[in-house]
Image (tube, grey):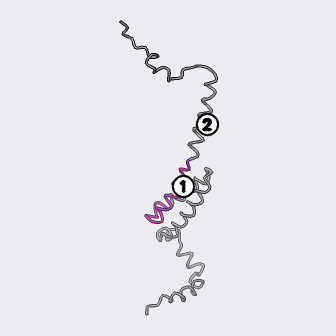
Amino acid sequence: MNYFLDLKSVGLMSKIPLSLSERDQDDRPKLQRERELARENTPVAGYCAVGFGLVGIFGPGIIFTPLGLIFSIIALLRGQGTWGFVGLMIGVGGIFTSPLIMGLIGFGAAYAFFDWDSILKPLYDMMGGGLDI
């Protein structure tokens, strides 16, 4: 009786390509480059830029708005222009919707320095001037 299992007769070895020809060796770097290109086509930095920017607008902006801006710069540098630009615009919107960040960057000082009160006076008058009736 034959107690040894013949792998070719079972069909397991016929599915594994084993060869040492140079033709197969030349395909390996080509496949590696294709995998790297496929990996680069996913704009992860752009996704993070837009996601953190949106969370910075509607959530705790002091944490997520700077993260959105950092990831949008990374996305722009990695060639993900559309995602980076959208993330940058959303990050700027996150700065303007966060009073804490605007206070940290000195927006009140800019308001007083440029005398925006006189520039915006017609708008305040149109809205009622801020007077209680």
**Element type where label 2 sits in the image:** helix
Residue lying at 60% horizontally and 59% vertically, measured from the top left:
85
Residue 26 x/y as whole percent? 64, 27
Does label 1 or label 2 sit earlier along the sequence? 2
Look at the magenta stretch and give its main secondary structure.
Answer: helix
Placement of 19 over or under 65, stated as above or below: above
Using the image, tell me which numbered label, if any, was put on residue 71. 1
Residue on which the image places disc 2: 33
Residue lying at 54% horizontally and 75% vertically, measured from the top left:
109
- Within the magenta stretch, is there residue 58? yes
Q: Label 1 sits on what residue type?
A: Phe
Name the residue nearer the viewer: 11 or 17.
11
Answer with left or right where residue 26 lies relative to residue 109: right
Q: Quadrant of the N terminus?
A: top left
Name the residue nearer the viewer: 26 or 111.
26
| Disc nearest the viewer among 1 and 2 | 2
Using the image, tell me which numbered label, if any, was put on residue 9. none
Task: Specify the segment rendered in magenta.
Answer: 42-64
Placement of 48 over or under 24, stated as above or below: below
User: Can you tell which quarter of the image residue 111 is in?
Assistant: bottom right
Residue 122 x/y as whole percent? 58, 87
Placement of 39 over or under 83, stated as above or below: above
Residue 69 x/y as whole percent? 54, 59
Q: How far is the residue under mark 1 from the one under mark 2?
A: 25 Å
Residue 30 x/y as whole percent? 62, 33
Residue lying at 45% horizontally and 16% vertically, measured from the top left:
9
